[in-house]
Image (cartoon, rainbow, N blue to C red):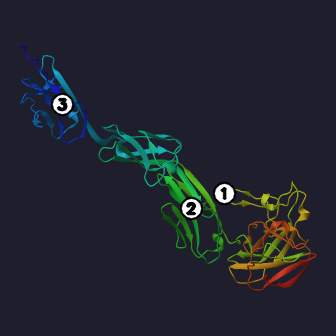
Amino acid sequence: MEAEPEVLPSFATPGKTYRVTTKDTVVLPCEVNNVGHFLLAWKRGIAILTAGSVKVSPDERFRLVDGYNLEIRDVQTQDAGDYVCQVATLQPLELTHTVEILVPPRIHQVPSGSQMEVKKGSSVTLECRAAGNPVPTITWTRKNNLLPSGEKSYEGAQLTLQHTSRHDAGAYQCTASNGVGQPATKEIQLNVQFPPEIDVEKSWVHTGEGNEAQLVCLVFSEPPAEVVWFKDTLRLASTERRIAEVRGSRNTLIIRKVQASDFGNYSCLADNIIGKTRQYLELSGRPNPAKFRSHTISRSRDSYNISWEVESFTPIEEFKLYFRKVPQGPNSQTSNGGGLFHYQHNNRRSQRRHDEDGQILAGYPGHHRGDWNDVILPAIPSGQYAQKMSYMIRGLEPAVQYEAMVQAKNRFGWNEMSEPFIFATKGNGQYAGGLESSPAVLSEPDLSWSLDGFKMKKDIIFPLP
């Protein structure tokens, strides 16, 4: 009888890749069918870890379990690689397992000290590098704010900011994540150096004698600026009545018990190592601009009761009212478009022409001066901060739109011209221009002036119901 051929060994399990994190334990199986008298061995590269039942490797973390399975305890990053279970046949059989170590992300490169400084207008690149397996993804965010681009986040190792401004300063966070463990985060504080920038809370401040006034400059700068106050060209020092106060970016000049000599032009000057900036303010006893309080629509076809209110700490002496038909036609424009008054402004003060009494003169449009009617009205003493006035205009045309402006004068001068006010007379059951009626404001009779064919007389004008 012929001998039966010898059955050769074969592996019962295939090779595969094992992904484990550091400090974990992994078992690499090596199950062999028909192993017979053949010797088994574990190898890693050229190093022999086990031969038969003998452990060759001195590393105590390696051992054989449940037959010929290789256990690796307390896995480290250096344990990554290929492990081969070999059967010592004439032509050796090999089974290969791959160990891949999953490593949580770790950020290893950010700017020194996590602080960066850049001058306004220049570009800066924030860089963040990280290690880990799989390769981490870097995401940029800004603490308590959006990125300068307006986006919430940006993905990439480098974040470049072009033409930086003070609004780009802040804490930027780079976050590295790869799905293993917790994401790693580092913070970079970006400081943008820039010359002072000043916002004026009110460029024109109204007050009265005996009151307290506050002039406010909001100063932003990096590094912080020194702020000094001037009246005209005179640098101001703190006194019992005049105090300079600083709270964060808010710089306030407080003037107590205001005197007439305190009125005038002031400026705040902010200076740091990058540059200096100045802003101008005016402290004035002149009245605030008037605000119209009457209906936009008259109940009459040929007259209109116009009323307004002016806030002034000092009694009003007189008013000047301007009114005319609203210009019609393609080449016409209301005073909103510059038809009545035109002022040149700069940071110091409004540039105006004045007559001998300090009256601000109107710059009438080229050939339309005759379109405007102006009436000077003596004020009615009221003793109130908000001083009201009404005026009955007669001799108007029905179903026509008119526009009006008004100025007020106290002993410190004329105020700025009011905003244009548009009103309309009644027509044949219609109102001009599609204006809608607004509610009456006056609640009691006001002594007022009326104009009938440009002849002055006093009337008692009752508010519209």
Quadrant where the image shows the C terminus? bottom right
Depth order, front residue of 313/426 = 426
Q: Position of residue 113 (x, y in %)?
A: 35, 45
- For the residues carrying marks 1 and 3, which lies nearer the camera in this image? 3
Depth order, front residue of 85/234 = 85
Quadrant where the image shows the N terminus? top left
Query: How many numbered dots are placed on residues in this image?
Result: 3
Dots 1 and 3: beta carbons under 8 Å? no
Dots 3 and 2: beta carbons under 8 Å? no
91 lies left or right of 422: left
**Residue type, mark 3 in image:** Ala
Q: Position of residue 102 (x, y in %)?
A: 27, 39
Furthest residue in direction front, as rendered: 1
Q: CA distance from mark 1 to mark 3?
A: 90 Å
| Residue 212 drawn above or below residue 152 | below
Q: Position of residue 249 (x, y in %)?
A: 50, 60
Dot 2: within a 10 Å radius of its alpha carbon, few (fewer than 14), some, or many (20 or more) residues?
A: many
Can you tell which quarter of the image residue 20 is in? top left
| Residue 200 drawn above or below residue 254 | above
According to the image, label 3 marks what residue? 12
Dot 3: within a 10 Å radius of its alpha carbon, few (fewer than 14), some, or many (20 or more) residues?
A: few
**Residue type, mark 1 in image:** Asn
Residue visible at 90% across and 73% down in the picture: 428
Nearest to N terminus: mark 3 or mark 2: 3
Q: Position of residue 381 (x, y in %)?
A: 75, 83
Circle 2: element type:
strand
According to the image, label 1 marks what residue? 347
Q: CA distance from mark 1 to mark 2?
A: 14 Å
Depth order, front residue of 310/30 = 30
**Residue type, mark 2 in image:** Cys
Nearest to N terminus: mark 1 or mark 2: 2
